[in-house]
Image: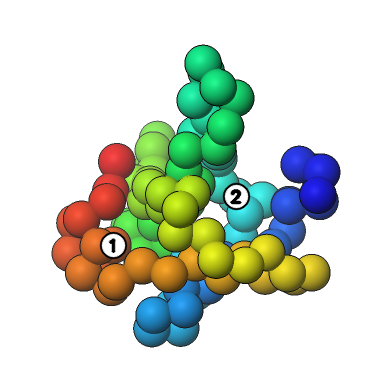
Amino acid sequence: MKFGELGGKEIVNLSDGTRLGMLAESDLLIDERTGKIKALLVPDIRSNFSLFSEKDFMEIPWEAVKKIGSDMIIIELESDKYGNGGMYL
């Protein structure tokens, strides 16, 4: 799959069915030495509006990605890892 084909896919958590956002609004964290993807950086859709457009991001480890489909990316994270300040940047 090409990088450009990932855009526009919705990210959904298999553990609890939570919709975490669209990949088009996200960034990838890439290991500079190996070129491998380390994590998805997804804007926290629950954060408040900011005048300076600074956003809180959630870091989803690449190992949590379970399936990439035609319109969706399925991840598996326990809700306490992202629901209570666990993986925010």
- Dot 2: what SS? helix
Going by the numbered disc 2, the residue's amino acid type is Glu
Q: Mark 2 — residue?
A: 25
Report whether residue 89 is seen.
yes
Residue ranking furthest to the top:
33
In the rendered image, residue 4, in percent from the top left (x then y), is placed at 80, 43
Q: Which corner quadrant of the image does residue 55 belong to?
A: top left
Quarter that holds the C terminus: top left
Question: Which residue appears at 66% of the width and 51% of the height?
Answer: 24
Binning the other alpha carbons within 10 Å of mark 1 as few (below 14), some (14 to 19) or many (20 upward) gives: some
Question: Which residue appears at 57% of the width and 32% of the height?
Answer: 36
- Left or right, 83 with respect to 42, comes to left
In the rendered image, residue 64, in percent from the top left (x then y), is placed at 44, 59
Binning the other alpha carbons within 10 Å of mark 2 as few (below 14), some (14 to 19) or many (20 upward) gives: few
Lower sequence index among marks 1 and 2:
2
Task: Decide: is 19 above or below 66.
Answer: below
Using the numbered discs, state the Cα–Cα distance from disc 1 to disc 2 in whole angstroms.
18 Å
- Left or right, 11 with respect to 87, comes to right
Q: Which corner quadrant of the image does residue 37 belong to?
A: top right
- Left or right, 63 with respect to 78, comes to right
Going by the numbered disc 1, the residue's amino acid type is Tyr
In the rendered image, residue 5, in percent from the top left (x then y), is placed at 81, 51
Q: Nearer the viewer, residue 13 or 21?
A: 13
Q: Disc 1 vs disc 2: Cβ atoms closer than 8 Å?
A: no
- Dot 1: what SS? helix
Foreground label between 1 and 2: 1
Q: Mark 1 — residue?
A: 82
Q: Which corner quadrant of the image does residue 85 belong to?
A: bottom left
In the rendered image, residue 17, in percent from the top left (x then y), is placed at 46, 83
Question: Which residue appears at 37% of the width and 51% of the height?
Answer: 58
Report whether residue 50 is seen.
no
